[in-house]
Amino acid sequence: MSVVLILALKDLKQLIRNRMGTFWIFIFPVVMALFFGAIFGGSQSGAARKLSLAVVDEDGSEASQAFVERLRKSDALSVVNLDRAQAHESVRLGNRSAYLVIPAGFGESMPLFGRSPATLELGIDPTRKAEGGFLQGLLIQASFEGLRDQFMDPAKLRPQVADSLAEIGGGKAGLSETQQKVLVSFLQGLDSFLGEVNPKAYREKGPHLEPLKFQMIPMTEKRAAPRSAYEISFPQAILWALIACSTSFALALVRERMWGTFLRLRAAPLSRGQILHGKGLACFLAAITGILFLLILGRLACGVRLDHPVLLTLAIPCSAACFVGIMVFVSVLGKSDQAVSGAGWGILMIFSMLGGGMVPLFVMPAWMRTLSDISPVKWSILALEGAIWRDFSLAEMILPCAVLLAFGSFFAAVGLLRFARMERA
């Protein structure tokens, strides 16, 4: 066993000295994980994404600015002020969900009676009707809050009541004489009330003009789901590290045969089994190190969950062992490093494409998901995801781990048989 360990340490030192090999095992997967995690949405664990709204305030009055400020306070909206052309273009290009134009005269249309309210222009993609309805509800809520603020401040409401009385008395409202008397009587009484009421007491103890209140009860679906895109991209990146690790050690084994190093080791004397076990142990340790490096980085930098250490202790060594077997198989695909590199990367790229190493399995058609069962990449990603976000039970983890060990044993057996024949030849 000490001989095998010494040979493994020798191979690990050679890997560290090989800067390109180290890059493909440790650095490239990190770039892949961060890049695709950012593309597919980054963190999604917090609240739902806000609706982006571009506001064009053509009125510039105190009322319009207060209206925009109420929209800004909404937890469901992300508001930015633009001019009309910029707002229209941002929605047309898909950079904003919608735009809202507050026309000139908005502030003057606020009296209670006598004038029609201003018409706001709302621009939104017609294919996003659900978001449009939701947005209209938020605008109505903000408008209602403005009306409530007016009622709760007699000093602001009385001038508006006076304007309404002037409009009705001047006949501009288009009402019948009977209706004019009714409204004038009501507004005069309201004006008298607002003039006599204590503003502080009115705001604290007066009527509460608020819409219905709801108690929000957070509901969680009873199914496992990734909290962020990084919980999908990091398992994929780990598979790239495993692929790079297996091909790097396969090429190292081929070069030892080409350069006579393997023959000199046999003359040491060391058995073929000791040499191959040393190579396999080095590959296994490098793979474990690469996986742990990516998982710890994902946890610290991107919030990838590591809540199931027991499941991870099954998924990590089984994945590493599988690719050790693949390493032995790849090393006998040719007699030169160019042949082995081309054949090895070709086979592993196919495994990666089928198994979700490039595109997540859930976006693949059904027939391709079925075909992916022949790829060890699929089962390794499944085992890692089962320990990270799929909330696998111990029994559910047995299947992918068993499949990985079966794949690894099969490839190792085929590789060893081929290796023995090549050595005899």
Image (cartoon, rainbow, N blue to C red):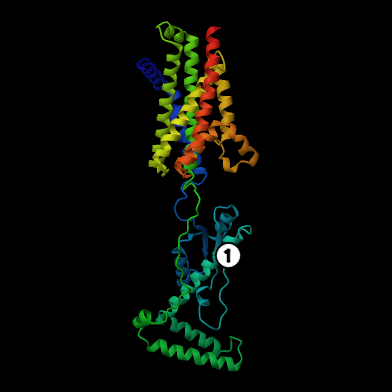
Q: Position of residue 377 (x, y in %)?
A: 53, 32
- Which one is nearer the viewer's eye here, 424 or 132? 424
- The residue drawn where x is 44% and y is 66% is 69
Q: Can you say which quadrant of the picture contains the N terminus?
A: top left
- Which one is nearer the viewer's eye here, 36 or 2? 2
Displayed quadrant of residue 368: top right
Q: Where 154 sits versus 178, above or below?
A: above
Numbered disc 1: secondary structure:
helix
State the residue lying farthest toward the top.
Answer: 267
- The residue drawn where x is 41% and y is 29% is 288
Quickly name the residue at label 1: 133
Say if residue 385 shows up in the picture: no
State the residue lying farthest toward the front.
Answer: 395
Q: What residue type is labelled 1?
A: Gly
Q: Where is residue 20 in the image (x, y as percent from the top left)?
A: 45, 23
- Which one is nearer the viewer's eye here, 44 or 68? 44
Q: Position of residue 4 (x, y in %)?
A: 39, 17
- The residue drawn where x is 50% and y is 32% is 402
Displayed quadrant of residue 173: bottom right
Q: Where is residue 256 in the image (x, y as percent from the top left)?
A: 47, 12
Q: Where 316 sits versus 411, above or below?
A: below
Q: Can you say which quadrant of the picture contains the C terminus?
A: top right
Q: Where 229 sits versus 172, above or below?
A: above
State the residue lying farthest toward the right.
Answer: 367
Say if residue 399 shows up in the picture: yes
